Image (tube, rainbow, N blue to C red):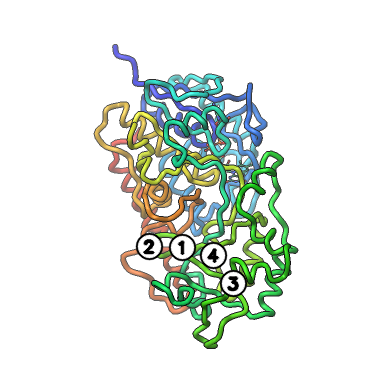
Amino acid sequence: MTAAPHLTVVGAGLAGSEAAWQAASRGVRVTLVDMKPGRTSPAHREPAFAELVCSNSLRSDSVEHAAGLLKAELRQLGSLLIRVADGVRVPAGSALAVDRQAFSGRVTAALREHPLITVKEDLVEEIPGSGVVLFATGPLTDGALFAALTRRLGTDGLAFYDAVAPIVEADSINQEIAFRQSRYERGEADYLNCPLDREQYNLFVRELLAARRAEVHGFEDRLVFEGCMPIETMAARGEDTLRFGPLRPVGLRDPRSGRRPWAVVQLRQDDAADSLYNLVGFQTRLAFPEQERVFRLIPGLEQAVFARHGVMHRNSYLRSPGQIDVACRLIREPRLRFAGQLTGVEGYVESIASGLVAGINAALDLLGRQSSFLPGPETMTGALLHYVANPTDRDFAPMNANFGLLSPLAEMPSARGRKQRREERIQAQVARSLESIRQLVAESAAFPL
Ligand SMILES: Cc1cc2nc3c(=O)[nH]c(=O)nc-3n(C[C@H](O)[C@H](O)[C@H](O)COP(=O)(O)OP(=O)(O)OC[C@H]3O[C@@H](n4cnc5c(N)ncnc54)[C@H](O)[C@@H]3O)c2cc1C
């Protein structure tokens, strides 16, 4: 009798735990390696696997929210971690929040009890020389392994620090206020410009300075000041600093007044489908609700829907586009695979989704199946993997699930108001996505188990 094929999963966080379970459920022997409990990252504290390092919320459970749709897809796809989360939920309105100890405890027990999974405590410092290996060591990948990955992928292949500006959905920007123009009208009119008069600017700066900041973890203090400067830190240098910096209005004329505004916030297209815009120069450490409150004071952004909030934190991730494919394989050495936040998805549920797809594909390849398991870009799971894999000329930064990532509808909604059009679009995208996952499960060689 030949032994079942073997997969090593390094990292038993959210992605690695899900990946190990998915591969083992399909008949692959898995060795799941984690440095815990002997060694922990600066954010991990518990000995159990699938630790939620901060909030105990897996965000909205309503399909009209991106994280809710992602969870609905993962339920259809048989995710272990979402099933466990559903079983240990605590009251949190429309969000799925969990008892974190029970969550990690039950996931750990399921993995330890699985007959095809062997758990091993080990600090992995090198890339194993043979075998199929899936790395899911997360945003705080331990030092020596990070260095080994950097040697293998090149210094351009990995990033260590994340300083990203918020991104808003294009159809939530009021384009009767925001005007399209390039500075001095040089080249294409690629930017959307939100004009502020003196009073609006002063109010914005005042609220920016008063806004609550996100908690800084001790191990991140030093990095913040080595990275580029948060907009609120810049604003604190003087009332005109932003007007002479990222909000400078020179070379811009508001077509409605024919005059140069007092200050201008520029928005730059962030995706090929033209559905997302980032706020240029707005890297920030404000708490997420405060970002929404303060940045919606900018004329044109009053109703902005935030696809991604600004963050500045330590975050190890691969510059994945062009290096890994949608099945989570390193293109030039497919025995090496990656999942979770290390690939450039951001968030608990996103990491679970990435682990699920990586685990299923590792199993299919090891079992010699010819097909891959590839949810399409019309699904939230597939859209995240396409975001991670597809090379574009944008600066790559980790991304949460959001509706702007989904492929555009063949027919755009026709409702009259902007808000109604968005609601109609989202309903159509949700229906399309869940149907696509249903079909994939019905037709894929990866199902039923
Ligand atoms: C401080 C902080 C707060 C966060 N708060 C939130 C939040 O509130 N909500 C949210 O959605 N997301 C949050 N995130 C993001 C969240 O961590 C990730 O989205 C998610 O945990 C990533 O899952 P993962 O499986 O990729 O990595 P992790 O869950 O981090 O798992 C990685 C695993 O790899 C192990 N490991 C690392 N290096 C090695 C090595 N060399 N050898 C062996 N094992 C190793 C670790 O011990 C760990 O168990 C936060 C991240 C950080 C750093």
Q: Amino acid at mark 3?
A: Arg
Sooner in the amino-acid sequence: mark 4 or mark 2: 2
Q: Disc 4 and disc 2: Cα gap in Å?
A: 17 Å
Q: Which residue, given by chain and number where applicable, does mark 4 sit on?
A: 305
134 to the left or right of 254: left
The residue sitting at 55% across, 74% down in the picture is 194
Ligand 1 location (quadrant): top right
Q: Disc 1 and disc 2: Cα gap in Å?
A: 8 Å
Q: Nearer the viewer, mark 4 or mark 2?
A: 2
Q: Amino acid at mark 2?
A: Ala
Dot 1: within a 10 Å radius of its alpha carbon, few (fewer than 14), some, or many (20 or more) residues?
A: many
Q: Nearer the viewer, mark 1 or mark 4?
A: 1
Q: Amino acid at mark 1?
A: Leu
Asked if disc 4 is less than 8 Å from ligand 1, the answer is no
Mark 3 touches mark 2? (CB < 8 Å)? no
Mark 3 touches mark 4? (CB < 8 Å)? no
Residue 141 coordinates in the image, percent (x, y): 55, 33
Say if 314 sits above or below 231 in the image: above
Residue 211 coordinates in the image, percent (x, y): 72, 61
Of the 4 image quadrants, the one containing the C terminus is top left
Q: Which residue, given by chain and number where applicable, does mark 3 sit on?
A: 248
Q: Which residue, given by chain and number where applicable, does mark 1 sit on?
A: 276
The residue sitting at 68% across, 43% down in the picture is 222
Dot 2: within a 10 Å radius of its alpha carbon, few (fewer than 14), some, or many (20 or more) residues?
A: few
